[in-house]
Amino acid sequence: MSKLFNDIYCLESKGVLAVASAPFCGSCPAVKHKAKELADELGFSYLDFDVTTPEGVQAAAMLKVESLPTLIFTTGGRARGKYVGSTAVKNMKSMLEELYNK
């Protein structure tokens, strides 16, 4: 298991918001920026990873990332939600709050 995959699921924090991205993804920078802002605001840990790196390829396969950008939210070592695409940016805060309060 990769350290990256382990970090996504096992960081000791309120929650982890991870973003899978790649240099060729046009919408990824905006999604990463918004996700980082929200993670800071809501007290979650934030990770972003490049799916074109060896470790990123392995983590993306384990997390079943099929499109970019993909946001993965975990708490307590358990996936709470996964969202794909830049349309999630507009509703990201309400989605995260809803997932966290489940």
Image: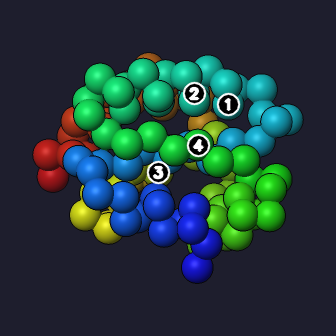
Q: Earlier in the sequence, mark 4 or mark 2?
A: 2
Give me the C-alpha separation between circle 4 and circle 3.
Answer: 10 Å
49 sits left or right of 77 in the view: right
User: Which residue is label 4 attached to?
Assistant: 48
Mark 3 in CB contact with mark 2 (< 8 angstroms): no
User: Which residue is label 1 attached to?
Assistant: 28
Q: Position of residue 31 (x, y in %)?
A: 57, 27
Q: Is residue 93 above or below residue 74?
A: above
Q: Earlier in the sequence, mark 4 or mark 3?
A: 4
Give me the C-alpha separation between circle 4 and circle 2.
Answer: 10 Å
Q: Earlier in the sequence, mark 1 or mark 3?
A: 1
Number of the front mark, 4 or 3: 4
User: Which residue is label 2 attached to?
Assistant: 31
96 sits left or right of 17 in the view: left
User: Which residue is label 3 attached to?
Assistant: 72
Q: Earlier in the sequence, mark 1 or mark 4?
A: 1
Q: Amino acid at mark 3?
A: Ile
Give me the C-alpha separation between circle 1 and circle 3.
Answer: 14 Å
Does residue 88 show up? yes
Give me the C-alpha separation between circle 1 and circle 2.
Answer: 5 Å
Number of the front mark, 4 or 2: 4
Q: Position of residue 86 (x, y in %)?
A: 59, 29
